[in-house]
Amino acid sequence: MERVLKSYFVLVYAFMYLPVAVIALFSFNSSEFMAFPMTGFTFGWYDIAVHDDRLLGGLANTILIAVPTALIATTLGGLAGLAVTRYRFRGRFAFAVLLIVPFFIPKIILAVAEVIAMSVVGIRHSVGTIVAAQALIILPFSAMVIASVLVRLDRRLEEAAADLGASGWQVFTRVLLPLMRNGLVASFFIAFVLSTSEYVVTSFVSGRTQPLSVMVASDFRFHLSPKLDALATLIVIANLLLVAISELVRRRAKGALG
Amino acid sequence: MTLVVTVGPVLVALTLLCLVPLGILFLYSFFRATFVAIVPEFSLHNYERVLSSGPYLRLILKALASGATIAAFTAVIGYPVAFFIAKRVRIVKAALLTALLVPLYTGDLVRIFAWRLILGTQGVLNSFLIWTGLIHQPIETLLFSPLATTIVLIYDYLPFMVLGLWLGLESLDDNLLEAAADLGAGRPAIFRRVVLPLTAPGLVAGALMVFALVVGDFLTPQLIGGASGVTVISAIADLFGAAFDWPLGSAIAWTLLAAMVAVVAAVVMLLRRMSWGDAMFGGG
């Protein structure tokens, strides 16, 4: 029975990584057509991908969007995490529910609602609108990551600081903030990665400045090339590194249960 | 840090970026579209069109059914996986959970495209089956079918279900399983009478996430399902794009949201009535 369970577990993980493996496989295939049989091994598509000016421009836009998005989502997520874990207030449950609403609303509905609202108020599509829309979608994730660190912190440390005469602000900057730093860093990385891979809402609220995800999406539909496989493989590797770093940081949080 | 300082900015952001736009969408659902403009006259005309027309109503029901079906599939597939992570590994627990989420970060379109390579006529699966000699001609109906959509939707949202189930199983006391076994319960009985009731909160959390994500999925049915890929979501997208009927699109969107809320409320009510809802609502 134990062996059946283990084999089943391995099988499900293989299923999860099958598409990633297929993309990586074809990124090394010398033929321009992505079909079997494979024709030969090449690094050529990687060479083409990293020298594509249009895609490089998209990558620059992606980072230009992801950094402020991750900062905003992490700041708001941190505040929300503090509110939910550190205060008992009326409407706390309603606040927590409201916090996950952006996760539960179908993305298309959120996207068209934001597009209409922007047209009513007269806001032009720009990098700013992408950042705002993405930060909203990522907020539930950031809040959850930071709250998961906050609930593990020993409340007595804050109480001790307050007893010893620290003001509320001092307790926050001198005790709470250093303790929750790892949660904030983890949230920043996860928000960064989620921002770079978001497509549906981004494509609706973007203007002329298009991030890589939107460019790749249109290429996948209209200009298919193994170059895109190479690019996707690089993105997966980069994301893997970022997620690994954030996990390491989060696990180092004091009192981590592992 | 006071309550106002923490809750305030979050509430402002959620209100401006989510609630106000949804409110404006709600207003639009009462307006009327002509060929050139949207006329702000209040009427229930759009909702009449949604509720009296077979196609839109059927698409909404199809979306809800699809969400429930995929949630059930992922639960069945996910329970052993979550059980293994929660109860059979110690040190690599975090790594396994992270590894489960990594494919999520590759981007929707990249993953969908990979599945087209796998399920296509000359794809990985057909090539493999021909190589093994199981079939001699490629199966052409693999891609662009409801089956393909189901497979890819399960793939897309399984990690969310496993996360929910894992949270439930992680807090399940091993002693209870042992006690049940000692008292003579077989595996099916242990699962049905101990594991399932005690992990119900995790199951419901996972199911609600998967349900909402499947109902709202835009790309998968469209790019994998072929002719079967018309969904209420793609209908809404069309009405805001080529068809240019924002009011009708808004009415459909809000009908869908109302239906989703109704399903979630029904699930919560049902759980409260059933005995194993007790674990979730504090012994209510």
Image: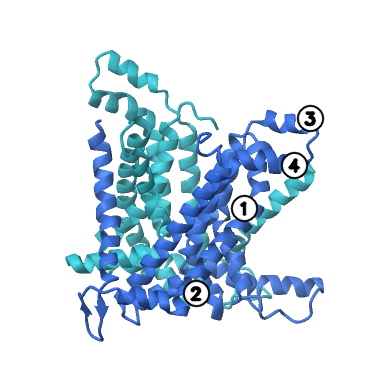
Chain colours: A cyan, B blue
Q: In the rendering, at what x and y percent does residue A47 appear? A: 49, 66
Looking at the picture, do discs 4 and 1 lie on one chain? yes
Of callouts 4 and 1, which one flags the residue occurring earlier in the amino acid sequence? Answer: 1
What's under tag 2, amino acid-wise? Arg
Residue A130 position, x and y percent, is 30, 60
> Which chain is disc 1 placed on?
B
> Viewer-nearest of labels 4 and 1?
4
Q: Which residue is drawn at 60% across and 41% down?
A: B275
Near mark 2 (Cα within 10 A), the count class, few <14, some 14-19 or many ≥20, is some
Give the labeled residue for mark 3. Answer: B182
- Label 3 crowd bin: few (<14), some (14–19), many (20+), radius 10 Å: few
- Element class at badge 1: helix
Disc 4 marks which amino acid?
Answer: Ala
| Chain letter of the residue beneath label 3 in the structure image | B
Distance, label 2 to label 4, CA atoms, is 39 Å
Mark 3 to mark 1 CA distance (whole Å): 27 Å
As drawn, the label of residue B189 is 4
Between the C-alphas of marks 2 and 1, the distance is 25 Å
At label 1, counting other C-alpha atoms closer than 10 Å, the crowd grade (few under 14, some 14-19, many 20 or more) is: many
Q: Could you tell me if the residues under marks 4 and 1 are in contact, i.e. CB atoms within 8 Å?
A: no
> Residues under labels 2 and 3: Cα distance?
50 Å
Work out how far the residue at label 4 is from the one at label 1, CA to CA, in angstroms. 18 Å
Q: Is residue B207 visible?
A: yes
Quote the CA–CA distance across marks 4 and 3: 12 Å
Q: State if disc 1 and disc 3 touch (CB < 8 Å).
A: no
Of labels 2 and 3, earlier in sequence is 2
Q: Mark 2 points at which residue?
A: B58
Identified at 25% across, 84% down, the residue is B34
Disc with the residue nearer the chain's start (2 vs 4) = 2
| The C terminus of chain A lies in quadrant | top right
Residue drawn at x 55%, y 38% as measured from the top left: B278
